[in-house]
Structure formats: structure tokens, C-alpha cells
Image: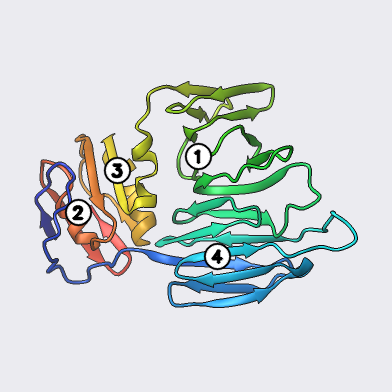
């Protein structure tokens, strides 16, 4: 096995000499149109597509954006829904027809209308992890649906983390306000607070969270705050599209700090932790 010499996470960028190393993720996604057509997106694709109601879709530089066309004779448009989904090892940016900006992390998706005209609520459905900067529209609130949990936006910037391999759904508020609703329970968050939906369906509010850490992935970093090895490996597995296998006793060490996402897999493993980590990369399998 290749041996890494762990340390607190940092931005060490020494070149990797590990055989079978894995490159980091990048701008990759699949767009599914209302008629079922799928379009593979990456950094190299640049295109303009026409969609109903005179709108258009622009694709380029890792960004998918919707330009809202003009309507005549009525203010109501029969919106069609599109879905943007990222694979493991992929991220993508989206600008909705209302100007709302969304960043999708790896292994995530968002379903949304191509137009918000004539709708009382701007509503989208989310899986995985996404960061939102909401465009303000008086009289037309924004809502994010995560399974049976509802996020009503009272402000502008927040994140949702709702991966199926993690026990809690986390919503973190950076600016403004959001209301989280699950069944009969409801919580309004203030900036710096995070709601956690437990597996039992209970809403819990955590105050004074590291909000910068929750959006580090959007800015090109892994961020760990006393995370255990399995939590660290969940993020690594999604970004490098690898399966993680554990051999021997599980490390009890906690990890903290930031590491650049642009590093190769072996480089990231090399700068993790103060004690040594033995690892082997074989195809898309990482053995710890």
C-alpha cells in the first residue's frame, strides 16, 4: 500500500507519484428536459437551446442559465420542468429563470420549472447538496422541497445538505431567513444557524455553526471540523468517484482544516491527519 503521512488538513500541493492515482472532479452534469431528452454537460460544451414560452437555455463554462422570454396576451405560462443532476465527481452551476443562482455539489440534483411566470410560489425539488442565492421577488416566495421537508425562503443565501448516505438533512443559513417545515414541526433560522432533521423526523437547531465550512465545496475546498474518518471519506468518495473499503481497525482520529479539491486523490490522502494513513488505489476502489 502507498503510505501517506497525515497532518492537519492544509493546502500542500506536492506532486503525486502514486500509480493509479485519481484526478479530482470537475464540471459535469446531465440536463433532462421536459420531453425526456437528456443532454450531457461538461466544461467544454457551449450551446444555446430554445425552450417553450420563448425562453432559452445557455450552456457554457460550467454554467446552465435560463433566459426568460416575453409573453403576450397573458401573464400565465404553462411551465415545464427540467432536472439538472450531477454524478459523483461532478459539480455544476445553475441560474434559474428568475435569476436565482444555484450551485450543485457532486451526486446531487434539482428539479425546477423553466419559467416562474404566473406561479404563486417559486418551487424546486432538491437531492444531495446545493447552495442557493435567491433572487428577490415581491409576492412570489421561493420554496425548496427536500423529500417531505420544506424550506420556505425568507432571505437570500442558504445551503441544503440531504445526501441519502448521511443520517441528517442539514439546512444552513448564511443570510436572510428560512423556515423549515416537517409535518407539524416548524423552525425559523437566523444567519449562522443550522437546522438538522434527524432520522426520527425531529427538527433540531444548531447555533453558531461554521457557515464558511458548509460552502467550502462551492469555493473549491474540502472543509473538516473535527470530522471522523468515515465522514471525511464520504466527501472524498463523492468527489473522486471511488468506493471506499476499510481494512483493519478503524482510526479514531478527528480531522480539521481545509484541503483544495483540485488535488489528486493521493495528494489529499497525504495531507490528512496527524497519524499515518495506509491506502491503496486500485481502479475506482480506495482501500484504507
Q: Which residue is mark 4?
A: 64
34 or 49: nearer the viewer: 49
Q: Which residue is mark 2?
A: 269
The picture places residue 85, in percent across and down from the top left corner, at 55, 60
Crowdedness near tag 3: few (<14), some (14–19) or many (≥20) residues, C-alpha within 10 Å? many
* Upstream in sequence: badge 3 or badge 1: 1
Distance from disc 4 to disc 1, alpha carbons, whole Å, reads: 19 Å
Image-based side of 174 in relation to 143, left or right: left
Identify the secondary structure beneath mark 2.
helix
The picture places residue 277, in percent across and down from the top left corner, at 15, 49
Crowdedness near tag 4: few (<14), some (14–19) or many (≥20) residues, C-alpha within 10 Å? many
Q: Is residue 134 above or below residue 169?
A: below
Marks 1 and 2: which is nearer the front? Answer: 1
Q: Which residue is mark 1?
A: 157
* Upstream in sequence: badge 4 or badge 3: 4
Distance from disc 1 to disc 2, alpha carbons, whole Å, reads: 32 Å
Task: Mark yes or no: residue 154 visible.
Answer: yes
Q: How is the image coloured?
A: rainbow
* Upstream in sequence: badge 1 or badge 2: 1
* Upstream in sequence: badge 2 or badge 4: 4
Q: Which residue is mark 3?
A: 223
Answer yes or no: do the residues labelled 3 and 1 have beta carbons within 8 Å? no
Amino acid at each position: 500500500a502507498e503510505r501517506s503521512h497525515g497532518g492537519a488538513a492544509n493546502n500542500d500541493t506536492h506532486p503525486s507519484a502514486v500509480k493509479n492515482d485519481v484526478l479530482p472532479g470537475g464540471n459535469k452534469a446531465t440536463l433532462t428536459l421536459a420531453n425526456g431528452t437528456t443532454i450531457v454537460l461538461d466544461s467544454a460544451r457551449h450551446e444555446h437551446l430554445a425552450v417553450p414560452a420563448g425562453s432559452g437555455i445557455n450552456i457554457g463554462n460550467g454554467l446552465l442559465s435560463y433566459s426568460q422570454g416575453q409573453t403576450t396576451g397573458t401573464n400565465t405560462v404553462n411551465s415545464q420542468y427540467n432536472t439538472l443532476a450531477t454524478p459523483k465527481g461532478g459539480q455544476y452551476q445553475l441560474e434559474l429563470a428568475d435569476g436565482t443562482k444555484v450551485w450543485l455539489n457532486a451526486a446531487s440534483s434539482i428539479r425546477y420549472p423553466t419559467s416562474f411566470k404566473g406561479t404563486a410560489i417559486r418551487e424546486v425539488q432538491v437531492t444531495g447538496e446545493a447552495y442557493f442565492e435567491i433572487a428577490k421577488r415581491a409576492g412570489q416566495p421561493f420554496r425548496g422541497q427536500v423529500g417531505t421537508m420544506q424550506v420556505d425562503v425568507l432571505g437570500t443565501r442558504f445551503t441544503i445538505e440531504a445526501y441519502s448516505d448521511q443520517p441528517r438533512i442539514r439546512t444552513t443559513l448564511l443570510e436572510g431567513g428560512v423556515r423549515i417545515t416537517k409535518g407539524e414541526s416548524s423552525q425559523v433560522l437566523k444567519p449562522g444557524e443550522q437546522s438538522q432533521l434527524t432520522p426520527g423526523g425531529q427538527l433540531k437547531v444548531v447555533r453558531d455553526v461554521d457557515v464558511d465550512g458548509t460552502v467550502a465545496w462551492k469555493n473549491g475546498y474540502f472543509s473538516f471540523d473535527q470530522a471522523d474518518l468515515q465522514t471525511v471519506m464520504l466527501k472524498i468518495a463523492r468527489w473522486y468517484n471511488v468506493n471506499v473499503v476499510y481494512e483493519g481497525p478503524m482510526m479514531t482520529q478527528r480531522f480539521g482544516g481545509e484541503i483544495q479539491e483540485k488535488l489528486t486523490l493521493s495528494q489529499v490522502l497525504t495531507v490528512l491527519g496527524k497519524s499515518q494513513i495506509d491506502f491503496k488505489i486500485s481502479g475506482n476502489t480506495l482501500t484504507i
